[in-house]
Amino acid sequence: MATRTKRPVGRPPDELLRARRRHELLHAAIEVFARQGYQRTEVQQIADAAGVAKGTVYRYFPSKEALFLAAADYAMQALTQCVDEAVQAVEDPIDRLRTAAHAVADYFQRYPERIELLAQERAEFRGEIPPTHLIYRERRRERFEATIRRAIQQGRLPQVRVRSLANALYYLLFGAILCGSVERTPRQLRKAVCEAFDAVLAALDRGQPNQQPTG
Amino acid sequence: MATRTKRPVGRPPDELLRARRRHELLHAAIEVFARQGYQRTEVQQIADAAGVAKGTVYRYFPSKEALFLAAADYAMQALTQCVDEAVQAVEDPIDRLRTAAHAVADYFQRYPERIELLAQERAEFRGEIPPTHLIYRERRRERFEATIRRAIQQGRLPQVRVRSLANALYYLLFGAILCGSVERTPRQLRKAVCEAFDAVLAALDRGQPNQQPTG
Amino acid sequence: MATRTKRPVGRPPDELLRARRRHELLHAAIEVFARQGYQRTEVQQIADAAGVAKGTVYRYFPSKEALFLAAADYAMQALTQCVDEAVQAVEDPIDRLRTAAHAVADYFQRYPERIELLAQERAEFRGEIPPTHLIYRERRRERFEATIRRAIQQGRLPQVRVRSLANALYYLLFGAILCGSVERTPRQLRKAVCEAFDAVLAALDRGQPNQQPTG
Amino acid sequence: MATRTKRPVGRPPDELLRARRRHELLHAAIEVFARQGYQRTEVQQIADAAGVAKGTVYRYFPSKEALFLAAADYAMQALTQCVDEAVQAVEDPIDRLRTAAHAVADYFQRYPERIELLAQERAEFRGEIPPTHLIYRERRRERFEATIRRAIQQGRLPQVRVRSLANALYYLLFGAILCGSVERTPRQLRKAVCEAFDAVLAALDRGQPNQQPTG
DNA sequence: CATGAATGAGCCTTCATTCAT
DNA sequence: TATGAATGAAGGCTCATTCAT
C-alpha cells in the first residue's frame, strides 16, 4: 500500500553521509576509549567528541561494545594498510622485516592512543572474541613466514624453525609496543621499538650488508 | 553467640589469622579477577570464593582497586621468586637467560590465569600506576643486563647495545606470554613461549655448545 | 523526483487520499496496539505496518496517545454500528437483548484483537479520559433501558429496577468479553459469551417462548 | 575455608524483618502502581513510598515486573481470603452467592486502588502470564459451582447449565467491578456492584424468601 | 572483629517527537 | 507533502561501599 518513492534513484549522498559520520564516530571512539579505557568511557562522551547526540551513536552501532570492537578493528585495519604499503616495494627479506617493524613503530608513534585499544580489547573481551590483532596476524602469516623462509634460504637468517622465528619476531614487536608505550612519549616509543627490533635483527643477520638504518 | 573465639590473651594468633586470611583473599582475588576480568568481577564473588562476607574484604583491603593491585603484585612477586630460584645456580650466561625464560613459561603454565592479571592491570589502571611487571623488571634490570653483558664479553652474543638486547628479550618474552595465552592450553602456551625464545637465543648464540634443552 | 503526483487542480482527490491513509493508519494501529499493547508498541512499527514513514504518522495524528485513542474509538464505533444493524429489525425485547449480545460476541470473534484495545485504554489512560466503551454505552443507554422496560412491562422480565438490570447485563457482557478472551480461541470466546448471556436471559425470562438459539 | 557461624542459631528476627519489609514494599507497590499505572511508575517512587532506597527494592524483588506481579497476587490473595471468611458460616446457597459478591464489593470499596492492579496486569502482561484473578477463580471454581448446583437442586435457581451460570455470575461481578470503578467513589462503586448483582439474583430467585438485603 | 543489609550514584539503552530536505 | 535521521529525556538495574548489629 502507499506508493512511496524510497531512496530517490541515485542514493550516493545518503550513503556517503552515513559513511562519513560512521567514520567520525569511529575516530571519536578511538580517541575517547583510548584515553579513558572501555569501562570508564560513557557513550555520551563519545557522542560529545563526535558532535552528535547520544541517540545518534546508537543509529550507527548497536551497542557500546560493538562500537568499541569496530573501533579496534578500524585501528588494526589501518595499521595493516600502513605496513602493507611500506613493505610493498621492498625486496630484500631482511629489509622487509625491518621495514614492516618500523612501519608498525611509525604507526603507533602517530597514533599512540591506539595501543590502548589493543590492551583494552584484550582485557575486556578476552574469551568472547579473539583479539583483532591476532586475526590480522593470521591473515598476514603466510606472507610473513614466506619472507623469513626466503631469508633463511639466502643464508641471511640462521636455520631455525620458520614458525618459531616468525612467532618470536611478532611477539617481540607486540611486546615492545605494549611495554614501550608506558611512560614514554610517542617519539621515544618509536625509538625503543625500532632499537629492540633492529638489535635482534642485526644480531641474527649473517652477511650480505644491504641494510641501511631507518629512522 | 555461644562458642565465640574471643581474642586469646596472646596476640600473635590473631596476627597469624589475619595474615592467613589476607592470603586467602589474595588467592581468591587472583582466581576470580583472572577468570572474569576486573570490571566484570563483583567484590561479592571474591568474598564467596574466599568464604567470607563481603564486608570482611573491606577490612583487609580498602577498595576493590587496591585488592586488585595487591593481587597483581602478589602474582608478580611469586613469578620473580620462581625465576630467581631457577636461575640461582646457573652460571653460563646463555643458560641463565634460557633458564629464566623457561621459568617464566613454567610459572604461567602452572598459573595461566595470572596472565590475565597483567593484561587487566594494564588496561584498567594505565596512567594511574605503572604496571607491576615493569616495576619488577626495573628491580631485576641490573642483573639481567649484567648477564647479557657477560655473554657478549664471552663472545656468545653479538655485539649490540646491551640495553637494546635486554629490552628486546624482555619484550619477546612478554609478548609471547600475552599473545600465546590466547586460545592455547597452558601446556601449549609453555611450548610456544619456550620455542620462540629458544629460537631467537639459538639463532643469536655463537659457539660453545653448553645448552641442554629444558622442560 | 521524476514522477511526482503534484496536487492536481481539483482538491478532492487529496482529501480522499488523506482520508484513506488515515484509515490505513487506524487499522495498522489497531492491529499492532492490540497485538503488543500500547507501551510495547513503537510508532515505527505502526508506520511499517501502514507502509509509511514514521514522520507521516505524525502528520495524521499529533501523538502516539492520540493515535491510540483514535484507534480505540474507531473500534468501538465499528462495534456500535454492528450492534445497531443487528438489532434494527428485531422487535421482541428479549430477542433484541440477545441479538445485541450476540452481535457483540460476533464482532469480537471477528476482531478478537480489539478486545485488547479496551483493556489497554483502561489501563493506560484511566483517569485522563473516560473509557471509550463507557461513552458509547451512555449514548445507547436510553434505548437499551427502553428495551428492558418494555420487556418488564410485557411481563417477560421480573420487576427489578431497570437501571440496575441494564447495568447488570452490560457488566455481564463486558466481563464475559474481557475474561473470556483469555486463553480461548475467537470461536470459543463467542461461544462462552453467548452461553453466559443466554443462560442468564433464559433464567430471567418468564414465558412467551419466542427465542430461537442464535449462532 | 574459614569457619563462619552463619545465621546465629535462632534466625527469626532476620526472617521476620525481611518478611515485614517485603510486606511494606508490596503495599507501597500496590499504592503507587494502582495510582499511576505500571508503565508510568518508576521504581524509585515505590522505594520512596516504602521509605527505602531503590537498591533495596531489588533486594526483595528481582525486577519491576516481578514486583508488580507479586503485588497483584497479594491483592488477589487478600480478596480471596475476605470472601472465604465472609462466606464461611453462610448455609443458604443463594445467600452464599450474594454474600460472596458483597464481600468482593466491600473489599474493593476498602481498597479501590486494587481494581487498577487487575486492569494493569491484564493490559501489560497479557499473553505472558494468565491473569491472577483467573487463577484464583479456578481454585474456587469447584466450590462456587457446587453452591449453584445446590441452589438449582433446591429449586431456587432455574435449570440452566451450572457452568454457564457460574461463568455468567463471575463475569457480571468482574465487569461490574471494572466498569463501576470509573468515575465513582468507592462507596458508589460498592452500591453499584451490589445493586447489579442483587438485581440479577433477585430476578433469578424462585421462592423460599430467606434473603435479607445486605449493606 | 565479622557480617550482610542497605544505600544511591552511575550508565546503557530506548523511543516519542522534531525538522531539514 | 512525505521522509527518516537526529535528538535527548527518561528509567531500569547494578554494584562498590558503608555501617549498625
Image (cartoon, coloured by chain):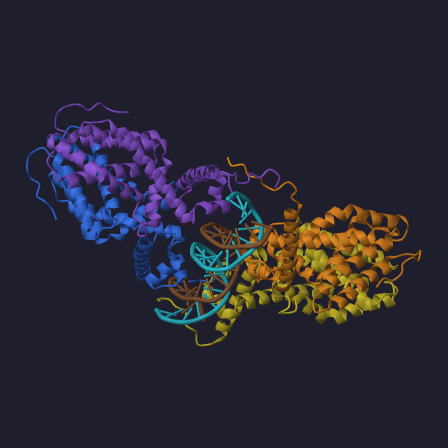
Chain colours: A orange, B yellow, C purple, D blue, E brown, F cyan
At 31% from the left and 44% from the top, the residue drawn is C132
Q: Position of residue D173 (x, y in %)?
A: 22, 41
Q: Is residue C131 above or below residue C146?
A: below
Q: Is residue C76 above or below residue A79?
A: above
At 76% from the left and 70% from the top, the residue drawn is B143
Q: Is residue D26 left or right of residue A188?
A: left
Instruction: Say whether residue A61 is visible.
Output: no
Q: Position of residue D99 (x, y in %)?
A: 15, 44
For the N terminus of chain C, give its image quadrant. Answer: top right
Q: Is residue A130 left or right of residue C137?
A: right
The answer to which of B73 and D109 lies nearer the viewer is D109
Res B74 → quadrant: bottom right
Q: Position of residue D182 (x, y in %)?
A: 26, 48
Q: Is residue A16 left or right of residue B31?
A: right
Specify the farthest residue to the right. A208
The answer to which of C212 and A205 lies nearer the viewer is C212
Q: How many marks?
A: 0
At 83% from the left and 61% from the top, the residue drawn is A198
Specify the farthest residue to the front. C9
The answer to which of A158 and F17 lies nearer the viewer is F17
Q: Is residue B134 left or right of residue A205?
A: left
